[in-house]
Amino acid sequence: TGTVTSGAMSVTDVQLLSDADATDALRAIAAVESSSEHPLAQAIVRHVLTSSQDQLPAVTDFHSTAGFGVSGVVAQHTVFVGTERWLAQNHIELSVADLQIIAAQRASGASVILAGWDDKLHAAISIADTVRPDSREAVRQFTERGLNVVLLTGDHIDVARTVAAQVGITEVQGGITPEGKVAAVIELQRAGRRVAMIGDGVNDAAALAQADLGIAMGTGTDVAIAASDITLMRANLAAAVQAIQLSRHTLRTIHGNLF
């Protein structure tokens, strides 16, 4: 999100999975998400505010757990919004029917955000993104230059594989937590590889810092930019290819001058 894809997220489908009032449920979900900076959260807020100009209900006791989801108290209900693992950690179980609906949503390549409270799943919201037009060409150029490209994402593995296929990446890890991204970088480093990490979000910051070279998208979060070595001022992967080309050329010039 925001690296290989554009980050211009939009809600494409809302499945209400309980007998709760649809308007009240979506407003409660949007209220909790309004305190989050994540692009998926902001897409939900925009969707709800577009259909209703009323002010969102108040939220107290807001908490965010990177890579999992958020929670907050709305009208005396603790609302949990995020992944299946996040809901399971908070004692909200999904039925077989729920899982089938979620799988159908993901089959289209959409990310699915789940929301529940009072120990029950209430909604599954599909959010679609578009692949950056330059991403496939950038991946091809990385490969041409002898670089092995790996896609690490917190999105579900089905969504990750769909995006990876569109841009020509064969090695994919989905459903990765921020700690999991760091672990993946360390594993490659221990195998003797030099690793460049490209990211734009809070969930990428630790891996950007761990990598031998951290590259942040200029449109990303402040924490990602602070953790990186290079910031791309253009929001596309082609700039990362150019940065590596420029670095290699500079190093060859330095070596030539020293010789």
Image (cartoon, rainbow, N blue to C red):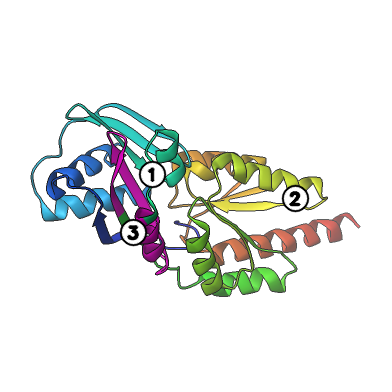
Callouts 1 and 2 close, C-beta under 8 Å: no
In percent of the image, x 35 and y 54: which residue is there?
98
Tell me the number on the disc at residue 188.
2
How far is the residue under mark 1 from the one under mark 2?
Answer: 29 Å
Depth-wise, is mark 1 or mark 3 nearer the camera?
A: 1
Report which quarter residue 25 is drawn in.
Answer: top left
Depth-wise, is mark 1 or mark 2 nearer the camera?
A: 1
Mark found first going from the N terminus, 1 or 2? 1
Q: Nearer the viewer, residue 188 or 119?
A: 119
Above or below residue 200? Residue 236 is below
Report which quarter residue 29 is drawn in.
Answer: top left
Is residue 211 something one can see in this rendering? no
What amino acid is found at the position of numbered circle 2 in the picture?
Leu
What amino acid is found at the position of numbered circle 1 in the picture?
Gly
In percent of the image, x 31 and y 53: which residue is there?
124
Q: Is residue 116 magenta?
A: yes
How far is the residue under mark 1 from the one under mark 3?
Answer: 12 Å
The residues colored magenta run 97-124
- Asked if residue 19 lies left or right of residue 101, the reply is left
- Asked if residue 150 lies left or right of residue 121, the reply is right
- Mark 1: few/some/many CA within 10 Å (<14, 14-19, 20+): many
- Mark 3: few/some/many CA within 10 Å (<14, 14-19, 20+): many
Tell me the number on the disc at residue 35.
none
- Asked if residue 241 lies left or right of residue 123, the reply is right
Q: Determine which residue is flagged by label 3.
A: 127
Mark found first going from the N terminus, 2 or 3? 3
What amino acid is found at the position of numbered circle 3 in the picture?
Ile
In percent of the image, x 53 and y 53: which residue is there?
153
Q: Nearer the viewer, residue 231 or 90?
A: 90
Q: Determine which residue is flagged by label 1.
A: 82
